[in-house]
Amino acid sequence: MTAFLNFFILLPIIGFVVSLLVASKREGVISWVVYLTVGIHVLGSQLFLIYWLLNGYPTLNLKDFVLIHTDHYEFFIDFTYDRITATYLFVGSMLTFLVAIYSRYYMHREQGYKRFFNTILFFYVGYNVTIFAGNLETLFIGWEMLGISSFLLIAFYRDRYLPVKNAVKVFSIYRIGDVGLILAMWMSHHLWHENITFVKLSNYELVHSQLQTHSLTGVFISLMILIAAAAKSAQLPFSSWLPRAMEGPTTSSAIFYGSLSVHIGAFIMLRTFPFWEHQISIRILIGLLGFVTSVIATGIARVQSSVKSQVAYASISQIGLIFIEIAAGLETIALIHFAGNAFLRTYQLLVSPSVVSYLIREQFYDFKPREYTVEDSLPKKIEYTIYTLCLKEWNLDSFMYRYFWNPLKWLGKQLDFTFMSRALYFLIPLYLVGLYGVYNRELVPSFVSEWLPIVFSTIGLAIVIKAFTERKLTFLSWTFLIMNHFWIALAVAFNQNFSFDEVHLYLSGIAISGILGLMCLYRIKALEGNIDLDRFHGHVYRHQKLAFLFFLACLGASGFPITPSFIGEDLIFSHIEENQYVLATSVALSFIINALAIIRIYARIYLGPHAKSMYEMAYRSS
């Protein structure tokens, strides 16, 4: 029975590859490729579900293949199937098939018709990898795919300012969730000394015996998982990104931010429930987070003027209730709630254009005064205060900017490396000295060796912050982003039992992606001249192939699962000791800011209104 699990992963991959080969003008062929891929997947999932139920619905686990094996670490792909996977597969396959049918006519003659369906299939691959994942490493592969496909679909209307701006904003929140998951995997390696599977986590005796002597480690892992889940499912304080994600086509909003992608945070909480089940403080925290999010999101939803924003905040509110149910141990109710909320929000978003037209007509021909509500019983000052806060969305956007992004920008401005040569003349010799110390560790005093990882990781963090805030020198920014990975590798190389084969694996993908990115930047500079980062240039229209190559370079340089760097990042964290919190935090922040700066370079150069357009363009919308 476990052999069938590969079918659910391979079929969407095959469909995605085939859809890439179809010419963009052949809309019928593209849509039929999607129909057949998702349709066969739906049929297969239904038949397998019946077969699985008739055989007593056992928990299936398949260790598919090992990507890398070392003396202390094993990175392997693992798939599992239980009632959580079955529920998410049933809902996901049905809704994706429904949206695919709807999109064929909704997206007819749209300029990005093929690009839309390619991205939908890419999302479907990531969704299936995520829900079938049998360990955190496999889940992280699908998790990254969901993040990239979200960015592409939010920025689908790439000639407009606001969709591209919001796509970068959403990606920034996703990246915080990514690093939460990376830190959870890091500490999990030290707790279990192996690549633990979700099936093993269901063993109460194993988990209980381990957490008895490592309670703080268990709390840390649980908090990191909660941060990842909250960012992915738009719980506080990350709730403001979901309505911004509605800038894409309505059909992609329905499948992503109404039904499937937004519930992945709840999925990871369900999947890891046996681990934090007996950590009462964590369960209380999850319940409180869900309650506060549900109350605040309900108030915000009631004052929104946009239908899609109303649905977005209503969905956030319901997911908050799902978090409460998960914290209470009500897994079955949480799964039913997820299915109901997913189907309802998809329906609401797909019919939202019609609903708006009906409501406009009713305002003229069937007007009714506002009915009495529970808020009218409150004192007027309190009522107006709550109303104003909900209109401002409780300043959630300002909170993120004030306490996270603005301090980073301020710090980057203090690191005023005016010219590339000045920075490189200082950094390259220092790096070579550090590299000499790694290969000749016996010459480095032990007390110095203990501090060097923190020093070098701090240098890497400083240069990536500078790259993130750089507005003019594009080549400087890209060079610093690539150098950041080398500084991270150098910092971790001073730890014990570090293999140079592993760092070579990590940096090989970074080096190739960095060189490809530089070649693309030099080419676009020669063709267009100005590629400063102080505005959007929109060069994708005249240079689509170059934009695609640079996008691949960006994915490789940020550790996406297309290069060995993805495995290398996990290997790097496996060598950070469990007591090196400063080093782990520094490396984690570097990965967050690095990916944000890379995707920002891509967005600034290739997306947005074209720099040479002779027509006036609206840079912002309502």
Image (spheres, rainbow, N blue to C red):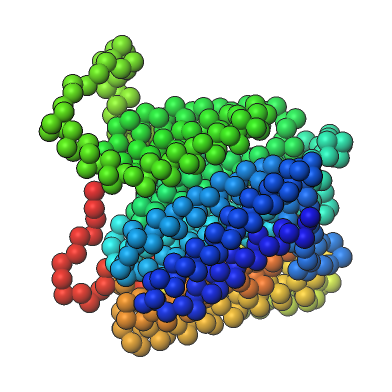
Question: Is 614 in front, or is 402?
Answer: 614
Q: Position of residue 95 (x, y in %)?
A: 50, 50
Which image quarter: residue 352?
Answer: top left
Mark yes or no: residue 185 visible.
no
Question: Is 64 in front, or is 49?
Answer: 49
Quadrant containing the N terminus in the rendered view: bottom right
Q: Position of residue 315 (x, y in %)?
A: 45, 38
Q: Is residue 590 above or below residue 289?
A: below
Q: Residue at x 44, y 54 (%)?
A: 99
Q: Position of residue 512 (x, y in %)?
A: 59, 81
Q: Residue at x 35, y 38 (%)?
A: 310
Q: Residue furthest left?
A: 364
Q: Residue at x 73, y 59 (%)?
A: 4
Which image quarter: residue 610?
Answer: bottom left
Q: Residue at x 37, y 28 (%)?
A: 299
Mark yes or no: residue 51 visible.
yes
